[in-house]
Image (cartoon, grey):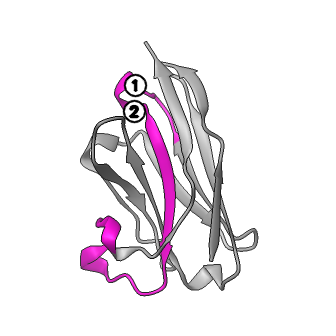
């Protein structure tokens, strides 16, 4: 499976962005896709995950501001980000796996397919 993210950019604090992750080369509807992010000098953090049963989970720092969704007809997963803060600045990466178990879905090591990432910069 190949994953390609898009939608990153520069936005002012309080603004919104919608990230997209287009998948190819596999049966996307059977995969569990997730979003992670990595800020400069920091470790990669879990952001959000969804699965074929629409069971979503979010990192605590999301605080209701982000929404993950998927469109299996387009083989795409989205991350709608609202009320962005400067601390949301990071490279956001899409990940996917066909074998991740529920208890491990917040762990980056559970995913074997990754996109190249898209930069999000939130200015104050």
Q: Which mark is residue 85?
A: 1
Residue 63 visible somewhere in the drawing:
no
Q: Residue furthest front?
A: 41
Q: Residue at x 50, y 72 (%)?
A: 96
Determine whether 117 is above or below 101 in the image.
above
Q: Residue at x 57, y 55 (%)?
A: 116
- Please name whichever residue, 22 or 17, is drawn nearer the observer in this view of the structure: 22
Q: Residue furthest top?
A: 124
- Mark 2 near mark 1, Cβ–Cβ under 8 Å? yes
Number of marks in the image?
2
Which quadrant would the N terminus be assigned to in this image? bottom right
Q: Read off the magenta span.
A: 81-109
Write down the residue under mark 2: 88
User: x%, y% of residue 99?
Assistant: 41, 87
User: x%, y% of residue 60?
Assistant: 25, 47
User: x%, y% of residue 20?
Assistant: 64, 52
Determine whether 48 is above or below 31 in the image.
above
Determine whether, in the image, residue 47 is placed left or right of residue 96. Answer: left
Determine whether 84 is above or below 111 in the image.
above
Q: Residue furthest right?
A: 74
Q: CA distance from mark 2 to mark 1?
A: 5 Å
Determine whether, in the image, residue 70 is placed left or right of residue 67. Answer: right
Magenta span has 83? Answer: yes
Q: Which mark is residue 110?
A: none
Place residue 21 in its image quadrant: bottom right
What secondary structure is found at the residue carrying circle 2?
helix
Magenta span has 107? Answer: yes
User: x%, y% of residue 38?
Assistant: 38, 44
Determine whether, in the image, residue 66 is placed left or right of residue 1. Answer: left
- Please name whichever residue, 76 or 41, is drawn nearer the observer in this view of the structure: 41
Q: Residue at x 34, y 65 (%)?
A: 108
């Amino acid at each position: 499976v190949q994953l390609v993210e898009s939608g990153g950019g520069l936005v002012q604090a309080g603004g919104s962005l919608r990230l997209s992750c287009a998948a190819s080369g596999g049966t996307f509807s059977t995969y569990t896709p997730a979003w992670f992010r990595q800020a400069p000098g920091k470790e990669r953090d879990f952001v959000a995950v969804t699965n074929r049963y629409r069971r979503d989970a979010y990192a605590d720092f999301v605080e209701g501001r982000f929404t993950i969704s998927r469109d299996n007809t387009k083989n795409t997963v989205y991350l709608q980000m609202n009320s962005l803060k400067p601390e949301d600045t990071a490279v956001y990466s899409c990940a996917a796996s066909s074998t991740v178990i529920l208890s491990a879905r917040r762990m980056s090591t559970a995913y074997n397919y990754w996109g190249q990432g898209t930069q999000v910069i939130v200015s104050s």
